[in-house]
Image (cartoon, coloured by chain):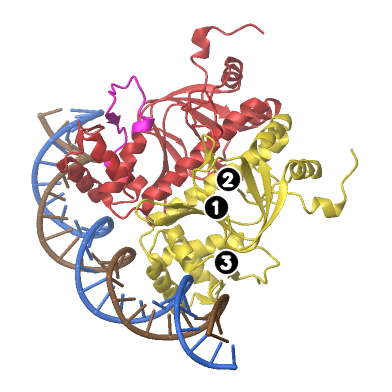
Chain colours: A yellow, B red, C brown, D blue
Amino acid sequence: MKKPAVAQIDRAPSLRAVPFDRTVADPETIQLTDRQREQLARIGMRLNLPARMVIYREAAPSHWVFAVAEGAVKCFRELPSGKRVVGAFLFPRDLFGLAENGRYINCAQAITRVVLYRLPIKELRVLLMHDAGLQFQFLSKLTHELRQAQRRTILLNRRDAAGRLAMFIDGMSIETVPGTGRTDDNVMLPMTRSDIAAFIGLSLETVSRASAELERRGMVKFIGRHAVRIVDQPRFSKLVADV
Amino acid sequence: MKKPAVAQIDRAPSLRAVPFDRTVADPETIQLTDRQREQLARIGMRLNLPARMVIYREAAPSHWVFAVAEGAVKCFRELPSGKRVVGAFLFPRDLFGLAENGRYINCAQAITRVVLYRLPIKELRVLLMHDAGLQFQFLSKLTHELRQAQRRTILLNRRDAAGRLAMFIDGMSIETVPGTGRTDDNVMLPMTRSDIAAFIGLSLETVSRASAELERRGMVKFIGRHAVRIVDQPRFSKLVADV
DNA sequence: CGTACCGTTGAGCAGGCTCAACCGCTGTGG
DNA sequence: CCACAGCGGTTGAGCCTGCTCAACGGTACG
């Protein structure tokens, strides 16, 4: 098997996760080998989708798992009351397509223009069974997502709106990807206020007010609607940690 | 390699998860082979711990993963404010011991007397790398836990205390294990009201009041402190689904 | 049998939700 | 090119529910 060209490898999936075990490597990234990425690229399909496109709907048969290459995606659920709960925001190197008994448990939609890898579950399963190392990377990724879920329950247990929003922004600052015009303390928020509200469990009015409060307290400065700049990092971090 | 005795196998770990893929098998249980369970038993240690024992503390070096055989465990976090957030309740066939960079991210404590399997991560990793099928079971289990985490965020997004409690009880009714004196609509709640409050994000007073409300509305009947009987299943289910 | 913790109940307060009006940007069609 | 509609976002007023503080009751365990 000949070595794939660099250009080809750059168009293959990769994953991001903090390992549960101690490692010397960059803790931010788990490393798929070129060969593993190539194999994933082979069974998968690279998709280029416009903003707002629905990727799959709740309860639809789940034939695929998706990996984000570029852009942002949201997974959400429509509740009987009409309320929407956002389960997760996904960014480059994230996986999504959580299913139960062969059906997706929520709806996925592109927030921005996105590039995705669509991996057929059947073939992925075969691949994982033949490559325990690759499977271990997926396992690490799931572990990472579980930790994030725990972090979120802590967020949702906070009583103060400003604190919740601060924790959210703090979380997003890690997700923020280079090459999107970000500086060190500039956090991109591609989603709407409504989406944020549905994620952190507040009404959108309260999110709006909390934003104003953070700004008034001199911790952050909103740059347009989809970016925040953390002005006073120490005080901001203190608020985030003050649970 | 000789086949292990039945008695020995009954003393080996197993896992419980709803598969993400369609299967014909009992959707409630994923099946470890006898050989896999035997191998887990070999690298692991069976522990018998009294109620209230601390299994590990937050930030302690994480050398083990645990599987519950009998009893109930809680994973929680002490926040700087002194508040506690319960991350999860664990029951037979559940896994716990979530870590990040080699350290546990929360504290685990026995609620009742428990029997655990303590699996050394290092050896488990080797085992998983040699047995992709076994690893796949672990992967399925993690997927299952992610779904539960999503379900919980929906719970935490509810505004009404009674509804939250109802969803919690509903969730516990699935966890409830036979052989604990349960009848079909009798749900065991081994944890304290305080623990429940720290899990569903309410003050313990509100949990108490919500319990009274559910009872007053004729949906449930509390049997002592650690059991509920669902009296009016239809109305109860309606409240649970009415998000 | 006592003691400490768990749980219940009550009164008052505060923070977030709801309803509602208003602003500003975007995209569309005349 | 402009007018207008529509959506996302902000701001305000009032209500409601869950939190806090506090006292009391009950149960489990030594």
Q: Taking A145 as reference, is D2 above or below it?
A: below
Q: Which residue is denoted by mark 3 in the rendering?
A: A190
The three-letter code of the residue at mark 1 reads: Ala
Q: Chain letter of disc 1?
A: A
**Residue linked to disc 1:** A108
Q: Earlier in the sequence, mark 2 or mark 3?
A: 2
Start-end of magenta stretch: B173-196
Residue B80 visible in rendering:
no
Name the residue: 63% across, 51% down. Answer: A94
Tell me where residue B165 appears, x and y as whole percent.
Answer: 29, 44
Whether residue B105 is visible, yes or no, is yes
Specify the quadrant that holds the N terminus of chain B. top right
For the residues labelled 2 and 1, say whether their Cβ atoms are less than 8 Å apart.
yes
Residue, x 31% and y 32% (percent of image)?
B190
Q: Label 2, label 3: how many angstroms apart (C-alpha)?
A: 20 Å
Q: CA distance from mark 2 to mark 1?
A: 8 Å
